[in-house]
Amino acid sequence: MAVDDRWYLKKRGPDGKRLRSERYGRGKRWRVRYEDANGEPRERLFERKDDAEAFDARARAGLAEETRVDQGERRTSFREYAERWRVSRQIGQALDYQRHTESRLRHHHYPHFGDRPIRGITVTDVLEWIAKLLQANVAQSSVKTYFDLLNNIMNSAVADKVIPDNPCKSIRLFAILRGFSRAPKWVPTDDDVLALVDVVPDEYQAAIWAGAGEGMRLGEVLGLEDSARCIDPDRQEVHVVQQLRFHKASYGGFYLAPPKAGSVGDVDLDDYVAAVFAEHVRKYPPVLVELPDITAGTPDPGKDPKRRLVPLLFTDDYGRPIHDQRWSDLWQVWRKAAGWPDEGTFHSLRHYFATRLITSGADPTDVQNALRHSSLRITLETYVHWWPKKDRRRNIVSSALRDARAKRQRSPRTKDPH
């Protein structure tokens, strides 16, 4: 637990004064990181430092409402509460309804939730349960019936003050069921990503890692600059605040624009990706390119956009920004050399990043934040059939790929790549 100043960086300038962050002057200034009653990492924002420090002290002492645990309630299992709920609701119910309720709980809820403390059931637990039902080819209408029953029980548990909130509340089941059509057509495996890394020229390796290790889109990667504006090792974050675009008529060529609507955000900087970025800068010094910058807003009609020198990480052989068509030509060569299918695009690296996080235990809201989706609904619609787990971990992607590379090196090659 700690109190962070979101308006200033920890790094200081040449004059010894603290440097302003990208968030300076916007939103609540003070952030408190803490663990809730279930041990899950959370954060809360405050306008005043005194309020933040007071909450931090209460959270450390376990006195804040968000961190306080009633041990008696925590030991109550889902089965114990659900049975009380079922019996208490039988008054006036038709016998068939009573029988169906008992059967549904016994066959579809208790095997997954029965012995768990009801207070410890999270959004991730419910999503995992839904995913298992769908993977077992349970009809979507039945999935909705079972979910509605769980939601009713959890709502009653909130009313009875057995649990602080209902984990079903943030899940839009209709969007999940509709989301199968939004699922990516192809997602690369660890070996697929390493096969791509093996064929991409050294000067573009860092771009591949930005996609696979940070979930960045192509325009965001080509717009990366060598500054704390984008890559911030001190805060262990990548600030996704811009993308490289091209429009000959309006801006005379290349320019910097905001990312896709709603996609501005900070992503944890993976330790290995940070090292890749640092090595890239050492071997291929950034090129200063003067570009129009409309990330702060489109200029008024008749006014020229602000221009600035941008130390771009990725340029062509002539020190110019990389056009997306030029990248597409290069990508076709790399994709074929790596044995990727036609569906394998740079965006597939973003799908790899997302599914790696989910299957390695990241919470859905953490995945949403990492992908900078505007809503949890979009994340769930796209990746519902990858089973989410509980614990959030760092360095997931780099660890998985390093392990896969070591395994490949221990195994003899089975075919001649030529």
Image (cartoon, rainbow, N blue to C red):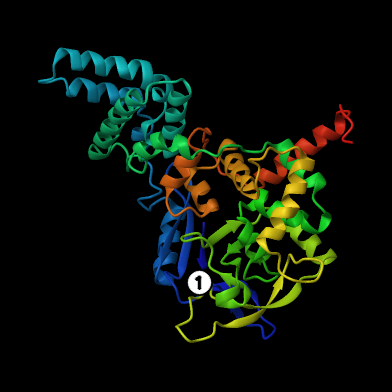
In which quadrant of the rendered image does the C terminus lie? Answer: top right
Q: Residue at x 42, y 69 (%)?
A: 28
In the displayed structure, 62 sits above or below 254; it is above
| Location of residue 141 with respect to 69 vertically, above or below | above
Q: Residue at x 66, y 83 (%)?
A: 16
Q: Is residue 302 above or below residue 219?
A: below
Q: Position of residue 159 (x, y in %)?
A: 23, 39
Could you say which is closer to the camera, residue 290 or residue 262?
290
Q: Is residue 50 left or right of residue 294?
A: left
Q: Residue 319: horizontal and vertical position, in percent?
A: 78, 71
Instruction: List the single residue furthest toward the front.
Output: 249
Residue 310, image x, y percentages = 68, 76
Q: What residue occupies the far left of the structure in this picture?
A: 92
Of residues 113 and 115, the one nearer the viewer is 113
Q: Secondary structure at mark 1?
A: loop
For badge 1, the amino acid type reads Arg
The residue wearing badge 1 is 23
In this rendering, would 304 be left or right of 51? right
Residue placed most toward the observer, 186 or 141? 186
